[in-house]
Image: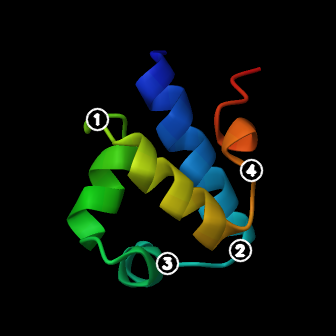
Amino acid sequence: MTRLQFLGKNIKKYRLQNNYSQEFLAEKCNLSREYISRIESGQKYISLKKIFLIADTLQVSVNTLFDFE
């Protein structure tokens, strides 16, 4: 699994823990649901700015999203 896939997997994990749909997370971050889907599947590169935005919305630290263990 690539780092990008691990990042997407962690975003999905914390999104589900918050009971957020992809649509809800996308709306809160001013992104499209398709963009969130592609991030979660490891198909889309994501800027650091958007990683911080998603982490804040999910109420986790950026370090948490990059915990690949």
The picture places residue 11, in percent across and down from the top left corner, at 57, 51
Answer yes or no: do the residues labelled 2 and 1 have beta carbons within 8 Å? Answer: no
Nearer the camera: disc 1 or disc 4: 4
The type of residue carrying mark 3 is Ser
Nearer the camera: disc 1 or disc 3: 1
Nearer the camera: disc 4 or disc 2: 4
Residue beneath label 4, please? 61
8 horizontally vs 68: left or right? left
Q: Which numbered tag is attached to residue 45?
A: 1
Residue lying farthest to the front in this orientation: 49
Task: Tell me which numbered mark, 1 or 3, is placed earlier along the sequence.
Answer: 3
Answer yes or no: do the residues labelled 1 and 3 have beta carbons within 8 Å? Answer: no
Q: Image quarter for residue 26? A: bottom left
Task: Tell me which numbered mark, 1 or 4, is placed earlier along the sequence.
Answer: 1
Q: Image quarter for residue 52? A: bottom right
10 Å crowding of disc 2: few (<14), some (14-19), many (20+): few
Which residue is found at the position 62% from the left and 43% from the top?
A: 10
Q: SS at mark 4?
A: loop
Nearer the camera: disc 3 or disc 4: 4
Q: CA distance from mark 3 to mark 4?
A: 20 Å
25 horizontally vs 56: left or right? left
Which residue is found at the position 32% from the left and 78% from the top?
A: 30
Task: Tell me which numbered mark, 3 or 4, is placed earlier along the sequence.
Answer: 3
Closest to the observer: 35 or 29?
29
Which residue is found at the position 50% from the left and 62% from the top?
A: 53
Closest to the observer: 38 or 47?
47
The type of residue carrying mark 1 is Tyr
Residue beneath label 2, please? 18
The picture places residue 41, in percent across and down from the top left corner, at 37, 41
Which residue is found at the position 55% from the left and 41% from the top?
A: 9
Compared to residue 16, the image places residue 68 above or below, namely above
Q: SS at mark 2?
A: loop
